[in-house]
Image: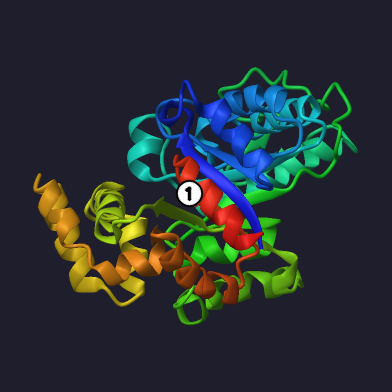
């Protein structure tokens, strides 16, 4: 199992972020993943990391497709891949209606069809075999709409990319989105993955996608984001994750459209998830965190002293996960995982 490291968005580690990534690289971590929401973007910090850290692979975790056209995604990916001597891992996600419509000013319509076309266009641009021509349901390139001037020209990426095939990962937790990841992606990045419930909840939609692509499970890099908090006080470490879980289950999305809550419900926690969301949306944040069971924390995260994390890791190592991305800003967490998995 490879080790990855995700500090979150760059704003979470601004100032000492490069030192933390350098440490992860020295410890043998395979990749670092930078997130974006409505603050710092995912690509710019990776350019700074590429200049400072010569070996670690660079992942966008996750770049939002609503924030950029497929051509802009391909241009940015190609540029960063050249700057880093071929170390880019391109993680893409659909985000959600609150961010897509509320921040990017785009309609959150047919998100999976949009992702399918986005990935196909990025790959066609990167292969640079012909000028770009794509007329789908979501993207029309060159544009042929009645409100255009009719002067659009089919173009080709000016420079030759360093690699014609940059690995593309999808962030996905909904059943249909997981199926899409299995069908079209090189890797899959789930948040809130449960290794114990993988076979009955996550494997069926993933298998459908893999079957459509004619691939085996071993041909997909499964790279879950796993909150990791190391410390001697197990209860305090759990409380740290409970606050994050409460925010994710309760506040990442509208009451009627929260993909993270839906996943926890599919794991068999409907009453718990509904209570957390009700408390969070009602402004009772501490009570929402307290409503997160210890067992759910231990199922979805790595917490506590080294010996407890070593026990938890057994479930992850027995799962189909091939890369474990530690979601942390703790130097001690990086050292602990490097010791236990190396």
Q: Is residue 255 left or right of residue 244?
A: left
Is label 1 in a helix, a strand or a loop? helix
> Vertically, is 70 above or below 206?
above
Q: Position of residue 144 (x, y in %)?
A: 66, 30
Viewer-side residue, 271 vs 34: 34
- Residue 116 seen anywhere in this rendered image of the structure: no
**Which residue appears at 61% of the width and 21% of the height?**
148
Q: Residues within 10 Å of mark 1 (few under 14, many from 20)?
A: many
The figure's colour scheme reads: rainbow
Viewer-side residue, 84 vs 54: 54
Q: Residue furthest bottom?
A: 200
Give the number of callouts. 1
Q: Position of residue 248 (x, y in %)?
A: 31, 51
> Vertically, is 78 above or below 5?
above
Q: Position of residue 322 (x, y in %)?
A: 65, 64
Q: Position of residue 215 (x, y in %)?
A: 76, 71
Q: Quadrant of residue 54?
A: top right
Quarter of the image that includes the N terminus: bottom right
Quarter of the image that includes the C terminus: bottom right
Viewer-side residue, 280 vs 205: 280
Q: Quadrant of residue 56?
A: top right
Residue to which mark 1 is pinned: 333
**Which residue appears at 14% of the width and 47% of the height?**
285
Viewer-side residue, 238 vs 187: 238
């Amino acid at each position: 199992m490879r080790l990855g490291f995700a500090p979150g968005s760059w704003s979470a580690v601004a100032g000492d972020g490069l030192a933390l990534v350098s440490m992860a690289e020295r410890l043998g971590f395979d990749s670092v993943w930078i997130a974006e929401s409505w603050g710092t973007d995912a690509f710019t910090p990776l350019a700074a990391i590429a200049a400072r850290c010569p070996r670690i692979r660079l992942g966008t975790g996750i770049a939002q497709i609503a924030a950029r056209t497929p051509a802009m995604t391909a241009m940015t990916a190609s540029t960063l891949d050249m700057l880093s001597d071929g170390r880019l891992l391109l993680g893409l996600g659909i985000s959600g209606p609150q961010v897509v419509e509320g921040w990017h000013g785009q309609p959150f319509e047919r998100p999976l069809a949009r992702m399918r076309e986005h990935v196909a266009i990025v790959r066609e641009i990167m292969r640079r075999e012909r000028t770009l021509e794509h007329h789908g349901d979501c993207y029309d390139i060159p544009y042929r709409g009645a409100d255009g001037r009719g002067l659009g020209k089919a173009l080709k990426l000016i420079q030759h990319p360093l690699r014609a095939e940059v690995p593309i990962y999808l962030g996905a937790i909904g059943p249909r989105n997981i199926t899409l990841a299995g069908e079209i992606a090189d890797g899959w990045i789930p948040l809130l993955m449960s290794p114990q419930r993988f076979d009955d909840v996550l494997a069926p939609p993933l298998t459908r996608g893999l079957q459509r692509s004619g691939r085996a499970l071993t041909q997909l890099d499964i790279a879950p984001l796993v909150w990791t908090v190391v410390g001697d006080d197990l209860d305090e470490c759990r409380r740290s994750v409970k606050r994050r879980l409460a925010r994710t289950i309760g506040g990442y999305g509208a009451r009627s459209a929260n993909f993270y809550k839906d996943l926890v419900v599919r794991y068999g926690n409907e009453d718990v998830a509904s209570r957390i969301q009700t408390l969070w949306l009602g402004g009772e944040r501490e009570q929402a965190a307290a409503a997160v069971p210890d067992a759910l924390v231990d199922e979805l995260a790595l917490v506590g002293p080294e010996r407890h994390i070593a026990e938890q890791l057994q479930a992850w190592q027995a799962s189909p996960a091939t890369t474990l991305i530690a979601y942390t800003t703790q130097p001690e967490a990086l050292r602990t995982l490097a010791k236990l998995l190396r």
